[in-house]
Amino acid sequence: MADAVTLFEVGPRDGLQNEPRSIPAKDKIHLVNELSACGFQKIEVTSFVSPKWVPQMGDAAEVLNAIERRAGVSYAALTPNARGFSDAVAAKADEVAIFGAASEGFSQANINCSIAESLARFVPIIEAAKVANIPVRGYVSCITECPYDGAVPPDTVAAVAQDLFNMGCYEISLGDTIGAATPTTINGVFDAVLERLPAAVLAGHFHDTNGQALANIETSLARGVRVFDAAVGGLGGCPYAPGAKGNVATEAVAQRLATLGLDTGLDVQRLQNAADFAKELRT
């Protein structure tokens, strides 16, 4: 049996949050339902953030409540604060995610606080999640380059990742937010992070701005990582990261992994159909 790799589908949230036109809730719901049929174990459906700042996610509760849930699929939501967590629980999110940054400039631009302040804000979310028995995933943005601060020291990435894990996050997704990473810089990040955390609790989140995402995934595989975020149809970007283009396309990652003899458990044809629909949402 081929080694298994888990693809965490983030298209409905990270993919659609930066689209210039308003995507109807019914289309988001249809996309999630199509993805559910592909064999994913994890789908990030939406984000419970203020619609003032991220209007595309203003229908979070409507979407999460209306999707057709399949057994064996964990439907996740991003929750930046206690209010967002409470709303996600009410909408029956199976797990939630919190997001920090490895650069002060991005932390200020994204959530209007320092790295240390952002970590302090997560404490009540994680405490509430423990009471509700809801898993929490942690994101670390800008693991090699920041659009505001430039190069990011790997030791800072490792420290933030360890802080999130120690707080109670079951998995830490390391994000190349602007797609500037290369295999060399990714190896530098893992040199630092793997001194503090095992590969089994890490995931890779790569944008394909410079066409390096698949190479960075292969580099991560060599370091023991077996979970990767990806967005169907290559949707995505970040409203607070100038220059951040689409996430790496899930279908491209699945194809590359299959070529490498790795098993994602996905229905490739169904995934391509979902990708075609996702691309239509961009027009």
Image (cartoon, grey):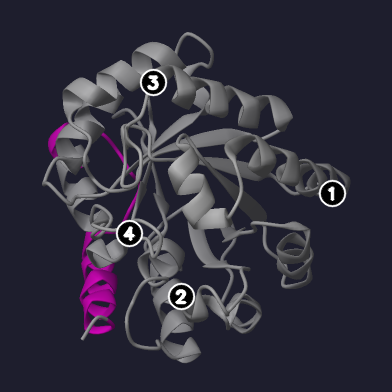
Q: Along the line of sight, which residue is nearer the eye, 8 or 242?
A: 242
Q: Is residue 191 above or below residue 271?
A: above
Residue 69: percent from left, percent from top: 59, 70
* Magenta span: 258-281
Task: State which tag comes first along the sequence, 3 or 2.
Answer: 2
Q: Are marks 1 and 4 in contact (CB under 8 Å)?
A: no
Q: Is residue 189 above or below residue 205?
A: above
Rendered residue at 71%/32% (across/down): 168
Residue that carries the numbered disc 2 in the rendered image:
33
Label 3 Cα crowd, 10 Å radius (few <14 / some 14-19 / many 20+): many
Q: Amino acid at mark 4?
A: Ala
Q: On residue 169, which mark appears?
A: none
Residue that carries the numbered disc 4 in the rendered image:
231
Q: Amino acid at mark 2?
A: Asn
Residue 250: percent from left, percent from top: 27, 55
Q: Are marks 4 and 2 in contact (CB under 8 Å)?
A: no
Q: Amino acid at mark 3?
A: Pro
Residue 115: percent from left, percent from top: 59, 37
Q: CA distance from mark 3 to mark 1?
A: 31 Å
Q: CA distance from mark 1 to mark 4?
A: 29 Å
* Residue 251 position by quadrant: bottom left
Can residue 222 be seen here? The reply is no
Residue that carries the numbered disc 1 in the rendered image:
128
Side of 241 relative to 83 (left or right): left
Residue that carries the numbered disc 3 in the rendered image:
154
Mark 3 residue element? helix
Mark toward the viewer: 2 or 1: 1
Mark 1 residue element? helix
